[in-house]
Image (tube, rainbow, N blue to C red):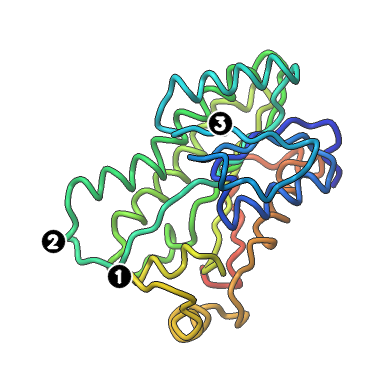
Amino acid sequence: MKLTDKVIVVTGAGGGMGKAIVSQLLERGAFVVGIDLSVDSMNGIQQPNFVAKAADVLNEERVSEIFAEVHQEQGKIDGLVNALGIAQAQTPIEEVSLDQWHRLMNINATSLFITCKQAVKYMKPKNKGSIITIASISAVRPRPGLQSYIASKGAAESFSRAMAIELAPHSIRVNTIHPGPADTNMLGQFTGEKGDNSAMKNDVFKQSVPLGELIQPEDIASAVVYLLSDNARMVTGATLHVDGGRGL
């Protein structure tokens, strides 16, 4: 599953899952452009085939500027990985503010519209491309108190499926990955806990995974590599569960 000479944009590249994705893409020979709120969050990625760009992905003008720069400098954009996302602390719906709802929907769903819109502009003329969105297994196996987060991830999956059928005539593939409980800093945010949260991870989340382990960022990255590669050339509109059986 080589990605040699492919130019791939990754949002949320400074997060735990984003960094794992970037690392595996680079190992497979891709040229990667990472986008996150600050370049500092991506300082640990020291590779000649990696470029860090700072942006608020809800700023359409800035996102458009970045994609134009990438296309001008590299001559193409082969792939987009939407790895950016935020969590919701378990909260009864009557205690969720409208601002909290909008923030979750904007970052987890509206941002996809903005990044995909820009990527497609450069993929269509080439009649080739691959777009992957990291959603969540909670979209199909919800947990109480996460209604706004789950709605945003459900929107991400539906949007991806709609894009898959729309872009199929242009040979642009669009797929979604549903991670199960992943061993990242984001996990503790679902319960509002802070710190290492080792006990919470074992008691609350690990026990919910039939295979008995938390999903590692590298597990998600491996799935991303597959979906971006030519090995998945006939895979589009799919949702790949990387969840240890949580979705069963």
Residue 88 locus on image (x, y percent): 34, 59
Instruction: Left or right? Give the position of 85 relative to 70.
Output: left
Residue beneath label 1, please? 144
The numbered dot on residue 94 is: 2
Residue beneath label 3, please? 165
The residue located at (80%, 37%) in the rendering is 48
The mark lying in front, picked from 1 and 3, is 1
Residues at marks 1 and 3 touching, judged by CB atoms closer than 8 Å? no
Residue 202 locus on image (x, y percent): 51, 84
Q: CA distance from mark 3 to mark 2?
A: 37 Å
Element carrying mark 3 = helix
When asked about the image quadrant of residue 124, the answer is top right
Element carrying mark 1 = loop
Q: CA distance from mark 1 to mark 3?
A: 32 Å
Badge 1: how crowded within 10 Å, few (<14), some, or many (20+)? few
Residue 114 locus on image (x, y percent): 46, 28
Query: Which of the two residues, 83 or 198, is positioned nearer the viewer here?
Result: 198
The numbered dot on residue 215 is: none
Q: Amino acid at mark 1?
A: Pro
Q: CA distance from mark 2 to mark 1?
A: 13 Å
Marks 2 and 1, the one that precedes in the sequence = 2
Query: Which of the two residues, 147 or 91, is positioned nearer the viewer here?
Result: 91
Q: Amino acid at mark 2?
A: Glu
When asked about the image quadrant of residue 231, the answer is top right
The residue located at (58%, 74%) in the rendering is 214
**207 up-or-down from 147: above or below:** below
Instruction: Left or right? Give the position of 42 relative to 57.
Output: right
The mark lying in front, picked from 3 and 2, is 2
